[in-house]
Amino acid sequence: MRVDHTRDQEMRRYLLAREAQLLAQLPSMGEEELRWTVRIFADGLDEASKALLLKGYSEYLPLEAMRAVVAAFIPQYTRLALQDLDAKSSMVGEGLRGFTDEELQGMSSAEKWGLLAKNPDALTSSQVARELARLLFCRTPDLFLDPSLPLATIEYPAYFEVQEALAVLPDDTLQELKRIALDQLETFQRGSYEERQKTLDALRGKITEAIGLPTLDALSEGRMERIPRKGPILPEEPPPLFLEDMSLEELRMSLKVLADFMSLEEFREGLLPLKDRYPSFYDLPEEELKSLLRRLAFTMGDRTILDYTARALFGRMVTGSSISPEVWALLPEEEKLQRLLADCDRMDLVQAARHISRTFLSPSSKALFDVGVQLRLLDDPRYRALQDRLILQFASPSQGERLRELNRQVTALVWEMEGAAPEAREGRFQEIREAIAKALSFNEVL
């Protein structure tokens, strides 16, 4: 049960003190120490958070460029860790769901698998892949019980390569590996040392078989060798869309996501001509839908579902190019605000309506950075209805300036909220939603 507020306060102090210490040491850190620091923090992040916090990062960067990225990454990581702590502080219940990512990273494999046995669905698929990868490094029962194992495994490129191999397995296969591990580890502590060693060996064999790893001998090779070992990944073109593996519903959802990124002009050029041929985008033939998605993905570039809601923290811009995290972190606070307001001024009516709607319909400040919440809004009738209301209410030229001012007001308030103390942030966010409700003459916040 998560009710130890003293412990939460201690964790908060620790996170802030660690940030200050790392930033103070940053000028003297060497290239290997910088890479190790990023690895240990990034290993506990989900893929969406990694993409936002580590945009532009590579272990092949020159030293000073790497140092600049890490200088931006550390405060942003601390902010997310504090938000995670706030969220888990209010949770009542036992098990893995009540622990922060920081706490999970500090546990032994034995403790985590023991808790997972009580609630097998508590971890995401990527977290399961991470724990299975760590099992491969549990060569002995002592390592299975060692809470410092996560600090050791991140030194080896094979650990991340194994995670990647597990991540692309069918989810049924991954869940079956988890089930096998839970079954075999159930009696682990009651066995002799030799029996426990046999259990670990058998489990490690199952994992290597699933990912096609020929031998375990190479796991500990290449300590702190740069990853990926094949060399830097150069962003010469957008990553491929694996459209052939998508169902028709997934293809349609992908179109919804991409359409939500588009400006009114981009929509008119890219999608409006289809209205003459099809009553709805849902009527597009599958092959034509795939062709359209490839074209739009190339046009949209690196835009993400969080561009509307993560602007203040990460420097994402709805119009034009987003600012790299390392540059954003170094900008004076007033310049950050001015850039965000300039982004507001460049938004068209539809983009401004989306920004205000997403902010208003996010139930909490943490939901602004939750990819799942922001994706679900695409299927929420309130999201479309609120956009329509904003566009109709402010469509006339005489009212257009009111929408622009409301958009600027919301942006400035969110920016101020992000600079507030963590304990005050949620109250400030609800005040922002109330300000939007008042501007739209709503009786109450939804």
Image: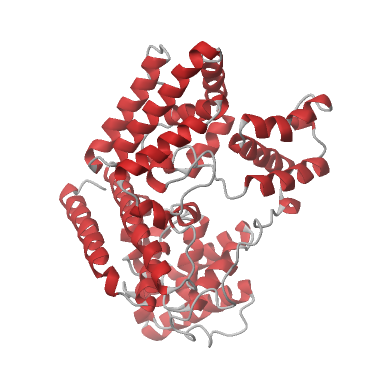
Rendering quarter of residue 62? bottom left
- Front residue (pair 211, 409): 409
What is the total number of numbered labels drawn onto the structure image?
Answer: 0
- Front residue (pair 130, 77): 77
Left or right, 284 with respect to 74, comes to right
Expressed as whole percent of the image width and height from the top left, the position of residue 335 reads 35, 43
Residue 11 seen from this side: yes
Q: Is residue 400 above or below residue 3?
A: above
Q: What residue appears at the point 65 percent right and 39 percent down from the top-left corner?
A: 253
- Front residue (pair 205, 64): 64
Q: Is residue 258 above or below residue 381?
A: below
Expressed as whole percent of the image width and height from the top left, the position of residue 365 reads 36, 37
Name the image quarter holding the C terminus: top left
Q: What residue appears at the point 57 percent right and 63 percent down from the top-left corner?
A: 167
Q: Is residue 76 above or below residue 394?
A: below
Expressed as whole percent of the image width and height from the top left, the position of residue 176 reads 58, 62
Residue 199 seen from this side: no
Q: What residue appears at the point 24 percent right and 57 percent down from the top-left corner?
A: 15
- Front residue (pair 42, 133): 42
- What kind of colouring is applied to the model shown? secondary structure
Q: Is residue 19 above or below residue 384?
A: below
Expressed as whole percent of the image width and height from the top left, the position of residue 410 reads 38, 28
Left or right, 253 with respect to 322, comes to right
